Image (cartoon, helix red, strand yellow):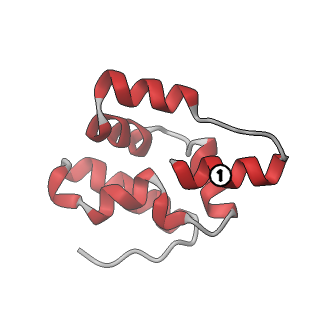
Amino acid sequence: MRALEEALTEESGKTKRLSRTRQKLGRVGVRQTLTDLAMKPQPSSGFLKLIEFGMADMSAEALVVKYAGDFEDSVVQAARRRLIAHGIAVLAD
């Protein structure tokens, strides 16, 4: 999240904070926030910006795949599909 905030700040020349994401993290925790982002029907704007900035490995989807054992299979598969659909290489199961 910090990396995206810094990239957005650099891009716009103004300080950018992901306030709603930070609030959600505080409310439901990291695992549920990552799950919700991976399961959204459409990619988040943050995901698309991370792809644009060449930082896909820092996306919620990449973290879900990296720590697949901590998530339900349906969440991991959704994260994999989104990464692959955006041209991001994903290791096989």
- Quadrant placement of the C terminus: bottom left
Could you tell me which residue is drawn at 69 percent across and 38 percent down?
A: 16
Q: 22 or 45, which is in the foreground?
A: 22
**Image position of 16 with respect to 48: above or below:** above
Q: Amino acid at mark 1?
A: Glu
Q: Is residue 52 left or right of residue 43?
A: right
Does residue 16 sit above or below 19 in this rendering? below
Location of residue 20 in the rendering, given as x and y in whole percent from the top left corner: 53, 26
- The answer to which image quadrant residue 52 occupies is bottom right
Q: Position of residue 58 (x, y in %)?
A: 47, 60
Is residue 61 left or right of 9 when viewed as pictured? left
Q: Is residue 70 above or below residue 90?
A: above
So how many labels did they put on this image?
1
Name the residue beneath numbered marker 1.
6
Residue 73: x percent and y percent?
A: 20, 53
In this rendering, would 53 be left or right of 29?
A: right
Front-most of residues 10 and 45:
10
Q: Residue at x 62, y 35 (%)?
A: 17
